[in-house]
């Protein structure tokens, strides 16, 4: 792929554009808000000038409700050899495109399983897709050349291609993405009216569970409107677990010993099933879940502290697999948790202590 056009230069479009531009592709940027396209260009994502002729690949990264119309316009204008979208739902846009009667041989629906709770070009990063699944939904009509262009995009973004049927994809993301978004929002919603004396006790548990509750509601209304049935199906399973758990907790309040035993069994059941489900969440690059060891470092809230830790870890030859930062309420300090292969934990701890870092047990 030599040239690409990204239509919709928000979080996803700009992240893909920066990755492509960094790997030698000439990227043109377009957004219905021109300021967003020029912001993306200023971030090194390409040029906001229109291409002179058709590009190799047009990447449509607009909200799901606008995908079909945007693609139809781009295809009618003959802007590219191949077209794809990155929307979080696949069945609806596909049916809308079919209803428009377009020739869909040059189109493939795709979905990178990676994102953030923040929107817009300023939230973009070139490594957003690294090691993450990127779903491709070719149909019998899809040209091989277009499938190959999509595979090239996925490879250039260092993601892992996964081929699926559009409707099977929508049922899968109802389970692993759309329902979790709603459940996170519901937990966070409990805090809206909560007393400040409770809110100030927020620790890492609630931060983990509610991170995605900060997502843009407009985007999620679009996503959920395009996948309501499968999400309602998964959520009704969650509702059944909620009912059972409430019943079990009420039993725990009882003076009757048998009832209390029932209550313990009910609560234990949901916690154990949660352990089993959590253990199935894949590790990076779709590999089996990896158990990392955590090295926790206390840092002061100053610019450059994280970069210094990463540099010291790099000099010690240690690969940091994942990182979490816990900010202590009301303190100018944070706890950085560095996740590393168990065999590297001792080397990292020694190297960081030698460089004067203060380690904590987790
Ligand atoms: N945010 C995520 O975590 C995530 C992850 C994977 C896929 N997606 C999908 O990627 C797409 C983009 O999401 P995002 O998070 O980058 O959103 P975003 O809000 O950051 O960016 C969307 C951009 O599209 C532009 N836009 C809207 N309508 C347009 C139109 N008709 N023509 C041209 N530009 C238009 C907006 O101005 C905005 O810059 C969505 O379809 C979303 O479902 C999002
Ligand atoms: O990590 C996040 O912030 C996300 O919400 C990313 C996430 C997801 O659920 O995994 C959200 C929606 C997208 O369609 C794909 C990825």
Image (cartoon, rainbow, N blue to C red):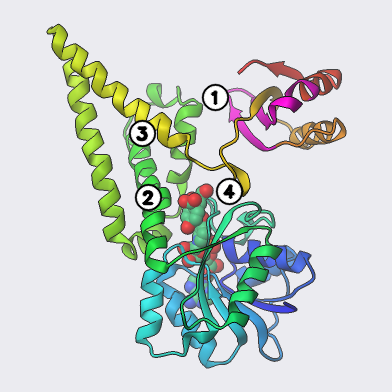
Q: Give the magenta range.
A: 321-347
Q: Evaluate if marks 3 and 2 touch, with contact meaning CB atoms under 8 Å apart.
A: no
Compare marks 4 and 2 and give the one earlier in the sequence. 2
Q: Secondary structure at mark 1?
A: loop
**Which of pointers 1 and 4 indicates the residue nearer the eye?**
4
Residue name at image x 21 percent, y 38 percent: 240
* Residue 26 drawn at (x, y percent): 75, 76
* Circle on res. 286: 4
Q: What is the C-alpha distance between the residues marked 4 and 2?
A: 17 Å
- The residue under label 1 is 329
Residue 79 placement: quadrant: bottom right
The CB of the residue at mark 1 lies under 8 Å from ligand 2: no
Q: What is the C-alpha distance between the residues marked 3 and 1?
A: 16 Å
**Which of pointers 2 and 1 indicates the residue nearer the eye?**
2
Q: What is the C-alpha distance between the residues marked 2 and 1?
A: 33 Å
Q: Mark 1: give few (<14), some (14-19) or many (20+) Cα within 10 Å.
A: few
**Which of pointers 4 and 2 indicates the residue nearer the eye?**
4
Residue 164 in view, yes or no: yes
* Residue 43 drawn at (x, y percent): 72, 62
- The residue under label 3 is 191
Q: Mark 4: give few (<14), some (14-19) or many (20+) Cα within 10 Å.
A: few
Q: Secondary structure at mark 3?
A: loop
Is residue 150 rendered to the left or right of residue 240?
A: right
Can you say whether 359 is above or below 10 in the image? Answer: above
Compare marks 2 and 1 and give the one earlier in the sequence. 2
- The residue nearer to you, when weighing 11 against 100, is 100
- The residue under label 2 is 175
Is residue 144 rendered to the left or right of residue 94?
A: right
């Amino acid at each position: 792929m030599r040239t690409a056009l990204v239509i919709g230069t928000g979080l996803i479009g700009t992240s893909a554009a920066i990755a492509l531009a960094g790997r030698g592709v000439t990227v043109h940027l377009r957004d219905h808000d021109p300021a967003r396209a020029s912001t993306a260009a200023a971030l090194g994502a390409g040029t906001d000038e229109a291409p002179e002729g058709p590009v190799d690949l047009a990447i449509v990264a607009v909200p799901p409700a606008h995908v079909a119309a945007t693609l139809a316009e781009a295809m009618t204008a003959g802007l590219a050899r191949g077209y794809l979208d990155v929307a979080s739902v696949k069945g609806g846009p596909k049916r809308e495109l079919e209803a428009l009667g377009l020739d869909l041989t040059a189109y493939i629906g795709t979905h990178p399983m990676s994102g953030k709770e923040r929107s817009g070009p300023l939230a973009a990063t070139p490594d957003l897709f690294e090691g993450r699944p990127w779903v491709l939904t070719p149909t019998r009509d899809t040209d091989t050349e277009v499938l190959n262009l999509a595979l090239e995009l996925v490879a250039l973004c260092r993601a892992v291609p996964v081929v699926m049927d559009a409707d099977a994809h929508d049922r899968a993301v109802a389970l692993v993405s759309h329902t979790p978004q709603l459940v996170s929002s519901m937990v966070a919603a409990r805090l809206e009216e909560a007393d400040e004396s409770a809110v100030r006790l927020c620790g890492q548990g609630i931060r983990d569970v509610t991170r995605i509750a900060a997502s843009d509601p407009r985007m999620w209304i679009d996503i959920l409107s395009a996948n309501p049935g499968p999400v309602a199906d998964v959520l009704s399973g969650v509702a059944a677990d909620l009912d059972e758990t409430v019943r079990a907790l009420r039993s725990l309040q009882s003076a009757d010993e048998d009832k209390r035993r029932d209550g313990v069994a009910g609560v234990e059941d949901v916690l154990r099933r949660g352990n089993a489900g959590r253990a199935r969440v894949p590790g990076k690059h779709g590999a089996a879940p990896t158990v990392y060891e955590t090295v926790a470092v206390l840092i002061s809230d100053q610019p450059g502290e994280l970069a210094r830790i990463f540099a010291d870890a790099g000099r010690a030859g240690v690969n940091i697999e994942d990182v979490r930062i816990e900010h202590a309420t009301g303190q100018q300090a944070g706890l950085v948790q560095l996740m590393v292969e168990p065999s590297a934990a001792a080397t990292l701890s020694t190297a960081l202590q030698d460089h004067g870092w203060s380690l904590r047990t987790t």
